[in-house]
């Protein structure tokens, strides 16, 4: 068999980039999404008011921004609050959230699963169980189908 | 509630004739089989073989007794019954991807086909040339059309698409009908005009809580009997209802179940939807408050005979499943054993439905009686 003399570089071209009908996502305004307020969350954690800290950390989720740092910072904060909870208080914490916040919490939980650290997965699994009891399978489906995630 | 298992393969789509004595269904292949009710049994009476690809949509026009089918072979056929045999007529849809769904208009003078070519073909019969012609609605659809439903005025058409949006278009064909009067959805309705577009899916009441993530594919759309309300289900496990004229009010409910694949109104304010959870669920819409609430799960509870488990069975279970119990959590307790893909109203129309039918991927068809359901589920309220 003779060797192909012509270059096969054309095989590396991404033809979808040149398709005129390509589906381009709409860009939403993302400038003012800075993620949860670190100072506020820290102070609430410090005073032991964990349920309030949970609410605070779930505010202003950096859903629309492309800035990876903001997203990482938010994820770190959320993880800190979730780990600070005692196991027996997790259920109360989840009960205090409304439906949209439970969905948001699920998003953060799955984001946390992506980068496990020593104890994070165990804590996240406990939160996952309680959030599942409230949000149902639907909340997980919404994590999977969400196009703009945390 | 009668469950009949037609086949072992999924039923891709089904359609009933006018008096519900015959059902046309596609057994997940290139053909359409028509079954006739014979007392308590169903016997196959016709096989319609013309498509070269899987038949993805069937609709049976009740008055003119014509069947329209569309398939993955990019064609649609209109079948008419002549001397006891169904004869097909090809309809050129001018699409270059598979057709996905088809619906006759209420007055049966035209039908709409949704396809993977990102457009809707509205087909009507041209008398002079004696064949079916089609017009396309293209803008601003950006992905496959998964579901269609006509408004009772025969002009407006709702389309659910894979680009996460549900839209209402005007499909006014001046060759076959007169100008329609104004409706809550709009008054100027030239062909192809988009009168409503949902923002994907998202609870309007709390925009800051990040609920408008973009939604999921819109699997199914349905107009209410009056045409003033439009309901759709989406792949992110939500059900939404929009009212014509109040374009800002979209009430949507993020359900706790797996995504719902089909939805229909059974009264002006109640919807029944079904999907991957294998049982239908009821939702009630409150127009005054603009809210949608979960009404209840509609299914026949399984009569689990709690017989004592013998020692022999216990050891068998231990051997087979490493569990000591009767281990029936793996079996579904619903009538359908696999996802329900289509729901259709049998009696009573969408205003006062008394019976509806579901078919699913388990090859079975169930006919549900609304009165019996209401009686058996205590806190079920069908408004």
Image (tube, helix red, strand yellow):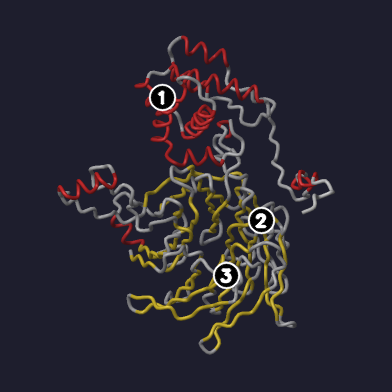
Above or below B212: residue B245: below
Q: Is residue B139 left or right of residue B383?
A: right
Are the numbered discs 3 and 1 placed on the same chain, yes or no?
A: no
Q: Earlier in the sequence, mark 3 or mark 2?
A: 3
Chain where mark 2 sits: B
Instruction: Give me the chain letter of mark 3.
Output: B
Mark 2 burial class by Cα count in 10 Å: few <14, some 14-19, many 20+ = some
User: Cα distance, mark 3 to mark 1?
Assistant: 52 Å
Q: Quadrant of the N terminus of chain B?
A: bottom left
Given residues B86 and B221, the one toward you in this image is B86
Q: Residue at x 51, y 62 (%)?
A: B225
Say which of marks 2 and 1 sits in front. Answer: 1
Q: Is residue B285 above or below residue B156?
A: above
x then y, percent, for residue B341: 48, 58
Which corner quadrant holds the C terminus of chain B? bottom left
Instruction: Tell me the residue that label 3 is attached to.
Output: B106
Residue at mark 2 to residue at mark 1: CA–CA distance: 46 Å
Q: SS at mark 2?
A: loop
Between B190 and B187, the one nearer to me in the picture: B190
Position of residue A118 in the picture relative to residue B113 (left or right): left
Q: Residues within 10 Å of mark 3 (few under 14, many from 20)?
A: some
| Residue of label 1 | A93
In terms of depth relative to the viewer, which is nearer, A112 or B382?
Answer: A112
Residue at 71% of width from left, 63% of height from top?
B96
Q: Residues within 10 Å of mark 1 (few under 14, many from 20)?
A: some
Q: For the point 36% across and 52% down, which residue is it?
A: B381
Percent x, y of residue A134: 40, 35
Whether label 2 touches label 1, CB < 8 Å: no
Q: Which residue is identified by label 2?
A: B186
- Pinpoint the chain carrying mark 1: A
Of circles 3 and 1, the one toward us is 1
């Amino acid at each position: 068999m003779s060797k192909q003399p012509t270059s096969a570089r054309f095989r590396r071209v991404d033809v979808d980039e040149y398709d005129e009908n390509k589906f381009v996502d709409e860009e939403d305004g993302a400038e003012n999404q800075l993620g949860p307020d670190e100072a506020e969350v820290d102070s609430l954690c410090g005073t032991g008011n964990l349920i309030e800290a949970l609410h605070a950390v779930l505010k202003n989720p950096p859903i629309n921004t492309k800035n990876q740092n903001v997203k990482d910072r938010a994820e770190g904060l959320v993880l800190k609050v979730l780990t600070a909870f005692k196991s027996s208080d997790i259920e109360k914490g989840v009960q205090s959230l409304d439906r949209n916040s439970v969905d948001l919490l699920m998003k953060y939980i799955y984001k946390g699963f992506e980068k496990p650290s020593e104890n994070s997965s165990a804590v996240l699994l406990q939160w996952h169980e309680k959030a599942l009891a409230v949000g149902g399978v639907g909340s997980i489906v919404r994590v999977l189908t969400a196009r703009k995630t945390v | 509630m009668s469950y009949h298992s037609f086949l072992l393969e999924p039923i891709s789509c089904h359609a009933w004739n006018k008096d519900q004595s015959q059902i046309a269904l596609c057994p997940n292949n290139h053909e359409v089989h028509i079954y006739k009710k014979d007392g308590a049994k169903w016997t196959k009476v016709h096989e319609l073989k013309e498509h070269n690809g899987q038949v993805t949509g069937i609709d049976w026009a009740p008055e003119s007794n014509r069947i329209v089918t569309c398939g993955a072979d990019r064609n649609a056929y209109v079948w008419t019954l002549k001397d006891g045999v169904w004869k097909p007529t090809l309809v050129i849809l001018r699409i270059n991807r598979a057709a996905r769904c088809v619906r006759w208009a209420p007055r049966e003078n035209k039908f709409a086909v949704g396809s993977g070519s990102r457009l809707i073909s509205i087909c009507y019969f041209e008398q002079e040339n004696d064949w079916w012609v089609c017009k396309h609605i293209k803008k601003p659809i950006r992905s496959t059309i998964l579901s269609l439903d006509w408004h009772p005025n025969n002009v407006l058409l709702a389309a659910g698409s894979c680009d996460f949006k549900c839209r209402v278009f005007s499909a006014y064909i001046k060759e076959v009908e007169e100008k329609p009067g104004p409706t809550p959805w709009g008054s100027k309705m030239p062909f192809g005009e988009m009168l409503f577009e949902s923002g994907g899916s998202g609870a309007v009441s709390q925009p800051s809580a990040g609920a408008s993530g973009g939604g999921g594919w819109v699997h199914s759309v349905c107009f209410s009997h009056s045409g003033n309300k439009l309901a759709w289900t989406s792949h992110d496990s939500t059900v939404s209802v929009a009212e014509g004229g109040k374009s800002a009010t979209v009430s949507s409910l993020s359900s706790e179940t797996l995504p719902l694949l089909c939805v229909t109104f059974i009264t002006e304010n109640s919807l029944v939807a079904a999907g991957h959870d294998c049982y239908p669920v009821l939702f009630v819409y409150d127009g005054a408050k603009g809210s949608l609430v979960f009404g209840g799960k509609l299914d026949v509870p399984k009569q689990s005979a709690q017989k004592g488990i013998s020692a022999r069975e216990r050891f068998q279970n231990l051997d087979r499943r490493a569990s000591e119990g009767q281990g029936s959590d793996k079996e579904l307790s619903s009538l359908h054993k696999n996802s329900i893909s289509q729901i259709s109203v049998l009696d009573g129309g969408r205003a006062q439905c008394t019976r509806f039918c579901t078919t699913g991927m388990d090859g079975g068809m169930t006919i549900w009686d609304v009165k019996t359901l209401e009686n058996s589920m205590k806190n079920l309220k069908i408004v």
